[in-house]
Amino acid sequence: MTVSSPSTPRPRPRSASRTAAAPGPAAAARPGRPGIVELRLSAFAGHRAAVLPLGPVTFLAGRSGSGKSTALRAFEALARLGGGAVLHEVFPEPVACVPERARPDAQRRRGFRIGCTADGPEGPVRLDVAVQAEPELRVVGERLTGGGQVLLETALRDPGRPVVQAAWHTAGSAPVTRGPLPDDRLGTALLPLRVAGRTDGQRRVLAAAEQMVVALRSVFPCDPRPGAMRGPVPLGPGRLLRGCDNLAEVLWRTRTECGRRHARLVEAARAGCAGPVADVSAAPLGDGTVRALLDRGDGTRTPLALLGDGELRYLALALVLLTGPGVLEVDPAGEVPAALQGLTVLADGFDRALDARQTRELVRLSAHVGERGHIRLVGAVGDATATAEVRGTHGVTVVEMGG
């Protein structure tokens, strides 16, 4: 991968992309909230030896087929594994993740490798996972490292047993502790159940694992579906779904919960929607459902059902960026104070159906919330106009895919 800045190109061997980044994106995550600052696709679908640096706001740019969606799929997979999901739930079609030209070994085994780095109070912590896709799906190796030291390492020793042999740093009477872990889950997410935390070494392992898991768990993949957003929706808990189908329900909840954020949403709607906008609201219909409306300020209230796809996607993405884990359908770490938790939004097709003005406003909004540190964004753009827009925005990291 070739990593470059706007001023001085710096080649790096075996490139899958190149990057133009604002100064010091990784350092922004460290003052409190853990965040993923690097995604590694060592061997995953069409990617080999790809290293994608991630800032508070990152856009993957490139033509169709350059691997943007694949990279976001790998990020989401790591997030789900960090939340404790089992492999077959995360990879329902694991063979599709195997590099196309990967040949099986003598035992007919093929697989893939992905990893990431989480920065935070413990400094950079690396996680690398090797998954066997054929002949059966299982984790065959995992490594968690911090400060140049291996804190957890697993390996498949006996293919006939559904476990991997794990060794984690102890620094007590024995340098490491060994034991079996299941081969269908991420070992890092299981460490709090296995490590007592009695020695300095064990506490270090737990702190590193917690930082990684917290960084991965609060991830919200978002792909608004305009067709599902137009109709009335039932009232419920008011947590936004990944397709933003229940946008009206969430507006009903958030409009009264935080006046300042709602005012920002109205400003965004005014900038990205056609015609005058005085308010964005939701109205009950008397049958337990609500519908979303744009108040035009002259007594006219336009149902969102009448808006175009671009306007609906624009409003949904703006709402996502202006809220947080308490409003979105994510799995925040309940044992961690809210002030130390962040949210990472994954937005494939970020610019889909948007015009240049809408893209510009959303990119600016992304950069603004990214500066505050509690929301991170990794989006994918393909349109040439959108790519030029993100390249010209201060505080945004751009990763050129397929270069």
Image: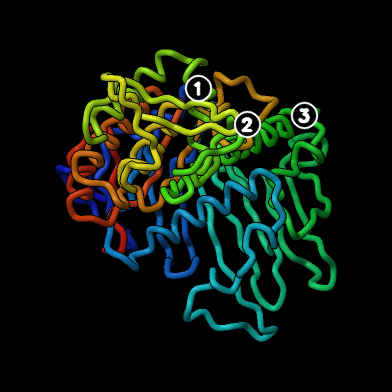
- Looking at the image, tell me whether mark 3 or mark 2 is earlier in sequence order: 3
Q: Position of residue 293 (x, y in %)?
A: 40, 30
Q: Answer left or right for 400 relative to 149.
A: left
The kind of secondary structure element at disc 1 is: helix
Q: Position of residue 70 (x, y in %)?
A: 45, 61
Q: Position of residue 364 (x, y in %)?
A: 26, 32
Q: Answer left or right for 108 relative to 56.
A: right
State the residue at coordinates (66%, 86%): 106
Q: Please state, as top left, top right, bottom left or bottom right, where the C terminus lies in the image.
A: bottom left
Q: Residues within 10 Å of mark 1 (few under 14, many from 20)?
A: some
The kind of secondary structure element at disc 2 is: loop
The kind of secondary structure element at disc 3 is: loop
Q: Residue furthest left?
A: 7
For residue 72, above or below residue 284? below
Q: Nearer the viewer, mark 3 or mark 2?
A: 2
For residue 315, above or below residue 139? above
Q: Residue furthest top?
A: 259
| Residue sitting nearer the eye, 130 or 10 | 130
Distance from label 1 to label 3 (Cα)?
Answer: 45 Å
Q: Please state, as top left, top right, bottom left or bottom right, where the N terminus lies in the image.
A: bottom left
Name which quarter of the figure residue 284 lies in.
top right
Q: Amino acid at mark 2?
A: Gly
**Residue 208 visible in this rendered orientation of the protein:** no
- Looking at the image, tell me whether mark 1 or mark 3 is earlier in sequence order: 3
Q: Amino acid at mark 1?
A: Thr
- Residue topped by disc 2: 288
- Residue topped by disc 3: 199
| Residue sitting nearer the eye, 75 or 165 | 75
| Residue sitting nearer the eye, 265 or 8 | 265
Name which quarter of the figure residue 89 lies in.
bottom right
State the residue at coordinates (40%, 60%): 50
